[in-house]
Image (tube, rainbow, N blue to C red):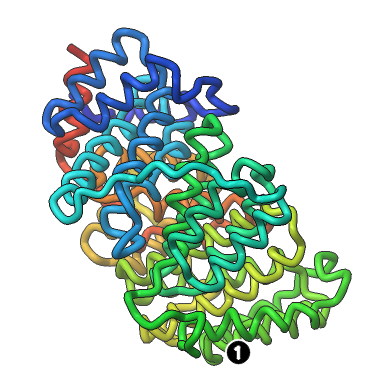
Amino acid sequence: MLAMNRRTFIQTAGATGVGLTGQLGFTATDQPVTALLKLLEDSVREHLPRELVQRIRAGLRYEELFAGLSWAAVRNVQPYPDVGYKYHSVMVLRSINETTQHLSSGEQWLPIVWAADYFKSAQAQERASSAWRLPTRLATAAGGAPAARRVLIAALEHWDRDAADAAIVSYAQAAPMDEIFSLLFAYGARDLREIGHKAIAVANAHSLVALLDSSQSEVVLRSTVAALQNSDAGPNPASHDLEPDRPWRKNEPRLREIPAGWKQGRSDPAARAELRLELYRVSEEEAGAVIITMLRQGISPDSIWQVLFDTAAELVMAQPSILSVHAQTTANALHYAYRVCGSGETQQLLMLQCAAFIALFRKYSGASASDFNLEALQPLPLHHAGVDAIDEIYADGSAGRRLQAAGKALGYLQSGADPELLIARTRHHFVYHADEPHDYKFPEAVFENYAQLADIAWRRRFLSAGMAHFKAPAQHPGPIVQETLELLQA
């Protein structure tokens, strides 16, 4: 049997597969690397799983394949005309790597081979529509990191894609990555034109460049900066007062209102309830002002982020759709940036922009505060225990009974059952049955946000709400997974 049975699942649920823990240590001039890149770029899609498994049997390491795929994707798939669709072949990679780190050794190759196949599909779309490949660009003299940063900011402010591409090449050679990303994180939160994909693209890029050689990192940065310049083919935002840009323009000067000790706030359930209601009531332009009021009242950033996560989860429960899913994945990307960014001002802007985006997602979905309240979710009893209980929860979810599935998940977790078993079972389902990148991106965003919540009881509620859009199990693995398993077991 290709998919895990229950006994095997229980034995391997806690096993940890490979993970990328540091820079990979090879460069673009290494012959094995260039050969792998050529294989990924030039192979026929239908032949690639077999060719990859042959290399795996010959000693190919996961780290090498992940780096090669990251490099191939940013070289061959542009974030135009949308930061989405085919560009998910780039943006899914952080989730692919996160999933892989939690898999057993027998399954660790499944996500990355699936991602390689998805890349080939995106590459074919790109070739059919534009024949685009990332052009070579040499750095120009920038006069040091400060000067290069000023040139990049000017290009980003003017939405000048070509100038920004030239500027990031020079800046990448003059400045450390932490400094570069303190800027890119902010511009990733500039607008919601691409339903959060700009923020997601920057978070994904940050996770990639930490693992790659400098020559590979440069192309990742170029791809990311190009993504930030998408403006829906409308008028240049630099010279127009456009609706998507107004929250950013209002929130930037608001940063001066934030008190110096803003990180040392308190957790306050009443304030969280008030903030939740405000996010369902105020416009995206005023959401940032609500956050500043909370900070000035001494409410901690952790409490604010909890409400942002929770409201995103409520939107998915109330109106499950690809749009509402992005409320959670966007909040996750912005909070990832908040955690790793060393600039306090950028952290503040990320939090204010996240509130604006949640208000926008609420407006787009048409959800109201009364549609679903995470605090009011009631635990429901289950007829089974262990993995069978999880299967019972998924049976309700598969039948469209998402509120019942969430209630049973909460009952399961409140009974003292191990949440890691539920998470591992969920990973098993999307690893074996994923159809598209959000099958990876959404649950990994939920799991990461779940891990950031300090209140254990509340974490259970938050995780339970994810049942609204976790990948449902299927009778057989997806075609690429099935083929990969058969090749690995031959």
Residue 187: x and y in percent read: 56, 65
Q: Nearer the viewer, residue 440 or 37?
A: 37
Q: Is 215 situated above or below 365?
A: above
13 is higher (above) or lower (below) than 389: above
> In the rendered view, does 253 fall on the left or right side of 397?
right
Q: Name the residue under label 1.
A: 286
Residue 5 coordinates in the image, percent (x, y): 27, 29
Question: The N terminus lies in which quarter of the figure?
Answer: top left
Which residue sits at x=30%, y=69%?
Answer: 321
Nearest the camera: 456 or 141? Answer: 141
> Vertical placement of 433 versus 242: above or below?
above
Q: Determine whether, in the image, residue 316 is placed left or right of residue 54.
A: right
Q: At which x and y percent is residue 421? A: 45, 39
- Which residue type does callout 1 highlight? Glu
Q: In which quarter of the image is the C terminus?
A: top left
Which one is nearer the viewer's eye here, 67 or 430? 67
Q: Position of residue 8 (x, y in %)?
A: 34, 24
At horizontal 53% and vertical 63% (from top left) the residue drawn is 188
Q: How crowded is mark 1: few (under 14 residues within 10 Å), some or many (20 or more)?
A: many
| In the image, residue 426 above or below residue 213 | below
Residue 473 left/right relative to 67: left
Whether residue 418 appears in this view of the structure is no
